[in-house]
Image: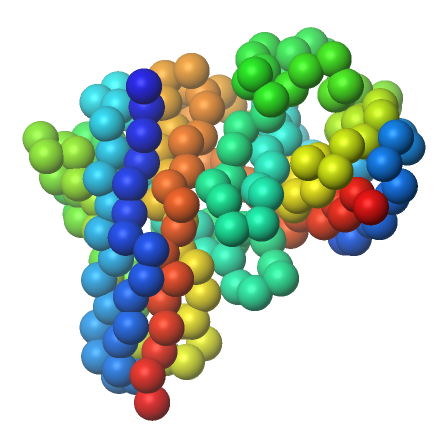
Amino acid sequence: GEDVEQSLFLSVREGDSSVINCTYTDSSSTYLYWYKQEPGAGLQLLTYIFSNMDMKQDQRLTVLLNKKDKHLSLRIADTQTGDSAIYFCAERNRDDKIIFGKGTRLHILP
Amino acid sequence: EPEVTQTPSHQVTQMGQEVILRCVPISNHLYFYWYRQILGQKVEFLVSFYNNEISEKSEIFDDQFSVERPDGSNFTLKIRSTKLEDSAMYFCASSAQGTAGNTIYFGEGSWLTVV
């Protein structure tokens, strides 16, 4: 069945770049997303990429998509303490359903 | 920027009670969704709704659950007789289009605690 996998934890020093990786299984995915969830808060859409693109940049965020390997990554440049959150990778399949990963908790070291 | 709003932000209810979670989707959106996240687990799809009917539902969405669009703006999720395992964050979402569309926008969630 469809699945989205991502590592559960990532620790990064403030000012360094964070790279959060994700793999997915459904080759018919139309859109791939990164959502951010801060403690006690809802899901905030950070960025998305259409499946026929391989890169998208939005300020400090860079999304890379390798469709052949079904691998998606989110790079956050110059990581700040405010970036501390859980980052969810998600895919939107042809049935219009969003399948989420378990989320990667990003911890910022001083 | 337009947003999906949900009420209540947090509700505590006794087991067996009925709960209604409310959502106001983005005004020109046509597709509506409910997802839930049990603490520490994945965000899971519950149901999608289009043209005043359910278009798809997951195995979680059993007879205890129902959805309704009672007027032109609200979209509700009702849990008829809550169980302890219904405790979760419930997210409403909406999108302008279905599979041909771009993004799905989520609300901030409603925390449901069943005691």
Count of marks overlaid on the render:
0
Q: Quadrant of residue B100?
A: top left
> At 21% across and 73% down in the image, what residue appears?
A17
The coloring applied to the image is rainbow
Q: Position of residue B32 (x, y in %)?
A: 63, 26
> At 24% across and 68% down in the image, what residue appears?
A18
> At 45% across and 76% down in the image, what residue appears?
A82
Q: Nearer the viewer, residue B18 or A62?
A: B18
Q: Is residue A52 above or below residue B98?
A: below
Q: Is residue B62 above or below residue B18?
A: above
Q: Nearer the viewer, residue A9 or A16?
A: A9
> At 51% across and 39% down in the image, what residue appears?
B43
Could you tell whether B73 is left or right of B109 in the image? right
Could you tell whether A73 is left or right of B71 in the image? left
Q: Position of residue B79 (x, y in %)?
A: 80, 27
Q: Is residue B92 visible?
A: yes
Q: Is residue A59 visible?
A: no
Residue sitting farthest toward the bottom:
A110
Q: Position of residue A8 (x, y in %)?
A: 33, 55
Q: Position of residue B1 (x, y in %)?
A: 59, 53
Q: Quadrant of residue B84?
A: top right
Could you tell whether B80 is left or right of B25 in the image? right
Q: Is residue B40 above or below residue A24?
A: below
